[in-house]
Image (cartoon, grey):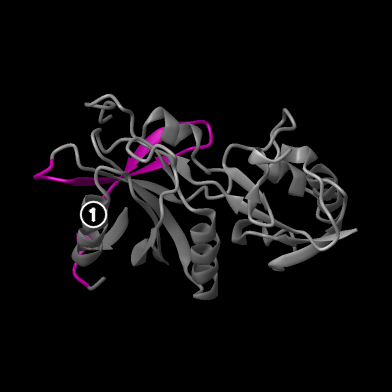
């Protein structure tokens, strides 16, 4: 089965500038392996040494965050869309005063 | 050194004040160290008083706009409502430095209501923090 993968700007150097590529796989993990096979180095951009999704990477299957599905084991069907996006998060502490200026 | 115009600085501070007591966030793009566009985004964190999480749809839209316009992503900004304009441990832990090694983390603190403060930092992949100087220049938003 083939899924459509949306590639963020920072990873398009791996895909020859393509914003959308197609890959085969019945889970998110399988698609990542397929991408790695076609675009060597891709897996390392998404997964850490422990094999888990990097904290700053979001993967969405048809607009749903895989962290709230079955993570890398999330099943995929023919025609599904897998979006790769940077995760931008953070924020101040609840403790007034915060952190040292330098 | 990163250059911001006074109206751009005012726009970020106004965004932070408008969102208070929730944190706000956005992206700055431009060229050659000069910010040209302030892209406001939506904070979808479940606890927005002390956290931000940029809406992924905004990230996709804004990064494509920047790419289409041939500009660079110069930095990400967010507000701290009650703490200093300095990266928190959460800011450092979640920083996407691997993908954006040259982008700066802009933090707008509203800790002093009368004197909001914007500072910019380079956060390395290993968590090292180094402040970048912001130069305010003449120009429009």
Q: Which quadrant would the N terminus of chain A be assigned to in this image?
A: bottom right
Q: Nearer the viewer, residue A72 or B138?
A: A72
Residue at the left extreme, as displayed = B114
Chain letter of the residue carrying label 1: B
**Is residue B22 highlighted in magenta?**
no
**Is residue B115 highlighted in magenta?**
yes
Residue B70 location (% of width, % of height) = 51, 73
Q: Residue at x 61, y 46 (%)?
A: A58
Q: Nearer the viewer, residue B30 or B109?
A: B109
Residue B15 location (% of width, % of height) = 26, 56
Give, as a single range, the part of the protein colored magenta.
B113-139
B128 over B48 or under it: above or below: above
Residue A30 location (% of width, % of height) = 85, 45
Residue B63 location (% of width, % of height) = 52, 63
Quarter of the image for residue B36 reads: bottom left
Q: Residue at x 37, y 37 (%)?
A: B130
Viewed as shown, does residue B37 lie left or right of B110? right
B87 over A60 or under it: above or below: above
Q: Badge 1: how crowded within 10 Å, few (<14), some, or many (20+)?
A: few
Secondary element at tag 1:
helix
Q: Residue at x 74, y 38 (%)?
A: A70
Quarter of the image for residue B117 reads: top left
Quarter of the image for residue A80 reads: bottom right
Q: Which quadrant would the C terminus of chain A be assigned to in this image?
A: top left
B71 over B12 or under it: above or below: below
Q: Residue at x 22, y 72 (%)?
A: B139
Residue for badge 1 = B18
């Amino acid at each position: 089965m083939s899924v459509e993968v949306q590639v963020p700007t920072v990873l398009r150097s791996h895909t020859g500038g393509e914003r959308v590529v197609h890959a085969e796989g019945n889970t998110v993990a399988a698609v990542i392996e397929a991408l790695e096979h076609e675009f060597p180095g891709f897996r390392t951009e998404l997964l850490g040494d422990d094999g888990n999704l990097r904290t700053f990477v979001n993967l969405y299957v048809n607009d749903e965050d895989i962290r709230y599905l079955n993570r890398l084991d999330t099943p995929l069907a023919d025609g599904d869309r897998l979006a790769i996006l940077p995760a931008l998060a953070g924020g101040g502490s609840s403790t007034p005063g915060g952190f040292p200026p330098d | 050194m990163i250059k911001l115009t006074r109206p751009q600085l005012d726009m970020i501070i106004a965004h932070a004040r408008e969102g208070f007591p929730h944190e706000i966030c956005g992206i700055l793009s431009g060229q050659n160290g000069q910010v040209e566009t302030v892209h406001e985004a939506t904070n979808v964190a479940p606890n927005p008083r002390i956290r931000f999480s940029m809406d992924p749809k905004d990230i996709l839209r804004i990064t494509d706009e920047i790419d289409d316009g041939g500009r660079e992503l110069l930095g990400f900004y967010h507000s701290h409502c009650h703490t200093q304009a300095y990266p928190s441990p959460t800011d450092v832990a979640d920083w996407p430095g691997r993908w954006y090694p040259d982008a700066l983390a802009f933090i707008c603190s509203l800790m002093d209501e009368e004197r909001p403060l914007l500072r910019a930092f380079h956060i390395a992949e290993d968590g090292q923090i180094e402040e970048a100087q912001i130069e305010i220049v003449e120009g429009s938003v």
